[in-house]
Image (tube, helix red, strand yellow):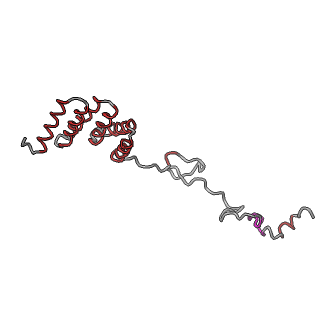
Amino acid sequence: MPFPTKNHRHSCTRWSENRFDPPTGYGFDPPTGYGWNAPPPRLSSRKIPNGLNLFPWFELSYSRKTQPMPTCDEQYDDAIRFKDQGDFPLAASKLLDIIKDSPTHSLSHSALAVVMHKLGKLDEAIAHAKKVVELEPNDPFSYAQLSVICQRCGRIADAEDALARNRMMSDGGLH
């Protein structure tokens, strides 16, 4: 008999009594819960805000989990990593992005003074060093950095003024 009859197929050992159950013995075992009469798996468990899942196959972009925005300090660490690797243009762009978001981040201005000097943008380097002094006028290091940047940029008189201010603050005003 080349083709089994309907009655023969139901009594065959390759098919169970329930003809909607998956066949067995054909080299595959279907995963648990995916029988012929089981509902199809959900393609997406995301729901729109009102609780309805109208389009389970379409993931809405706002329902995806997103990473939190990095803080200024995390962005600063990334920029310093680029600076240490010698990628000064990328470090400068990262630091400028930080300053755009947080103009009072003095560490970024301090690093930008060094990076701009390395890039040959001397006026911008001095401007950022002066911004550090403006943001932290009671910190002797800000004057020391201004002195070093001015000296490297060839402005010796400004460098000496900043160094004198640094010494005056470091000695407690006894100079």
Residue at 33 percent of width and 35 percent of height: 118
Query: For the view shown, which residue lies furthest in the right direction?
Result: 1
21 vs 97, left or right, is right
Residue 120 image-quadrant placement: top left
Q: Is residue 77 magenta?
A: no
State whether residue 22 is above or below residue 139: below
Residue at 60 percent of width and 53 percent of height: 43
> Start and end of the magenta stretch?
16-25
In the image, residue 125 lies at what x, y percent?
28, 33
Residue 171 vs residue 22, the one in the foreground: 171
Count of picture labels: 0
In the picture, the quarter occupied by the C terminus is top left
129 vs 51, left or right, is left
State whether residue 119 is above or below residue 45: above
In the picture, the quarter occupied by the N terminus is bottom right
Residue at 75 percent of width and 66 percent of height: 24
State whether residue 37 is above or below residue 156: below
33 vs 99, left or right, is right
In the image, residue 130 lies at what x, y percent?
22, 34
In the image, residue 4 lies at what x, y percent?
88, 64
Considering the whole magenta stretch, tell me its main secondary structure: loop
Query: For the view shown, which residue lies furthest in the left direction?
Result: 174
Residue at 19 percent of width and 39 percent of height: 143
In the image, residue 89 lies at what x, y percent?
39, 35
Residue 91 vs residue 105, the one in the foreground: 91
